[in-house]
Image: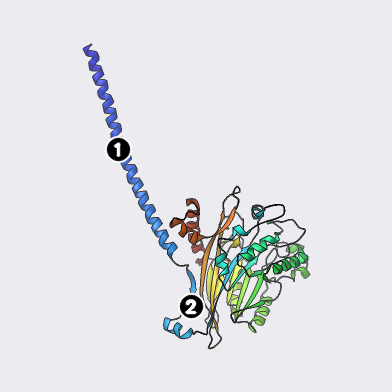
Amino acid sequence: MARSRRNKRRNTSKVVDYFSKFAIIAVVVIAICTVILLIRNGLQAVEVANQKVKLEKEIEAIFEQPIEQEEKEELEEPEDKTIEIAVVGDILCGNAMIEDAKTEGENYDFTPMLEKIEELTNDASLTIGTMETNFVQGQAYSGVEKYNAPTSFAEAIKQSGIDIVSIAHNHSLDYGIEGLTQTKQTLENVGFTTVGTENFIIQEVQGIKIAILAYTYGFSNENELSTQEIQNVNNYSAQKAKSDIEQAKQSADYIMVIMHWGEVNSTKRNQEQEQIADYLVSLGANAIVGSHPAVPQPMQMKQNANGEYQFVSYSLGNYISSLGYENSNLEIIIKLQIRKQAKNGKVVLEKVTYTPLYVLDQGEQQKNRYIVLDAKEEAKKYLAGEKNIDENTYEKLIESLDKIESIIRSNES
């Protein structure tokens, strides 16, 4: 019996030993995990702090007129007129957007997609975009190949604050001259001013006359079109641009050119875009704003022969779309602050700022699948405790801000 008790004591001792070792290991593991957690939380806190600093900065200025403060105060007089022109990219109506907007029967409501950014465009003196779809009766709605959208889409875009739309793009003649005529009439009935089928238009805002010209690089169905059909839209050529700008300079204070050009899904400008921009500046264009690539591209300031600064944005991306490839959900609104000096009538570009946008796809099951967000403002609200978006969306917005900043300030071609 005594031998049996000794064995029990040995077994008990082993169990205690095991428990002791296990306890030590557990304590070490917990300590390591705690340290890792503290480090991770500390790094996250630093990252969030850095993000807060970045988000609290005012919208970055792409350009500010290089004038000494004393000279600026001398130049600015109470009688001077200052206006702000906002420009957005291509306005697309994809198939998924059409499906998302469908309500009852043949009714569609696109307004929820844009309601969060309306104030960004409504507060400008003038807002311009490129309406890259058609409005043709009796044809199926489509966001691929031949573009055609419900009239309610145009109404929602107008409500969002857009005043002028270019209809010079590669889908302008998807339905021929008749489709172009119907599209132009529908847009004008909704309240838009259109550009792209005449040499130029002039908009007078607070005494400042802005000439707006619009051109496309060509047409998606060009091999199906006659010369007569092509002549109905401003198809870019150096000769035409020269003639149009020379005419516009006779009556305008400021000349803005909307260009539909470049390579789709490329965040870099190409050599042809840069050559055209240089040429337009040499002719007298004051601002050139591009679209068509469906993603943002760099911005530049170019000096003309007189040493004056002229602004070029190679692509703003889209104002709204349901395209699903990389960077197609990154969008930009730019604002050009223009001042007309009372004492000499000279018009100068004082400042260019931009607002980064993000097209959020919430998934097919959501009632309002697509929403355009002010990326910086929504991220700031999230950090302030307003949980209108989830953490995943917040991370996407932060990533989008970094991407847009990197793209637009790139010097690469």
Q: Secondary structure at mark 2?
A: loop
- Lower sequence index among marks 2 and 1: 1
Residue 51 drawn at (x, y percent): 42, 59
User: Of residues 152 and 42, which is closer to you in this image?
Assistant: 152
Q: Position of residue 365 (x, y in %)?
A: 60, 47
Q: Quadrant of the N terminus?
A: top left
Measure how far apart labels 2 and 1 are at the Cα level. 63 Å
Q: Position of residue 264 (x, y in %)?
A: 61, 61
Determine crowd level at label 1: few under 14, some 14-19, many 20+ residues with C-alpha closer than 10 A.
Answer: few
- Mark 2 touching mark 1, by CB under 8 A? no
In this rendering, the answer to whether 176 lies above or below 348 is: above
Density class for disc 2 (Cα within 10 Å; few <14, some 14-19, many ≥20) is few
For residue 251, which quarter of the picture?
Answer: bottom right
| Residue at image coords 67%, 78% | 244
Viewer can see residue 12: yes
Image quadrant containing the C terminus: bottom right
Name which residue type carries label 1.
Val
Which picture quadrant has residue 20? top left
Position in image of residue 346 (x %, y %)? 55, 85
Q: For the view shown, which residue lies furthest in the front direction?
A: 104
* Residue under numbered circle 1: 27
Please tell me which residue is depicted at 65% across the width and 69% down the height of the picture.
165
Front one among 1 and 407:
1
Residue position for label 2: 65
Q: Is residue 240 above or below residue 159?
A: below
Does the image show residue 132? no
Secondary element at tag 1: helix
Question: What is the residue that sits farthest to the top in this orientation?
Answer: 1
Q: Residue furthest bottom?
A: 343
Name the amino acid type tagged 2. Gln
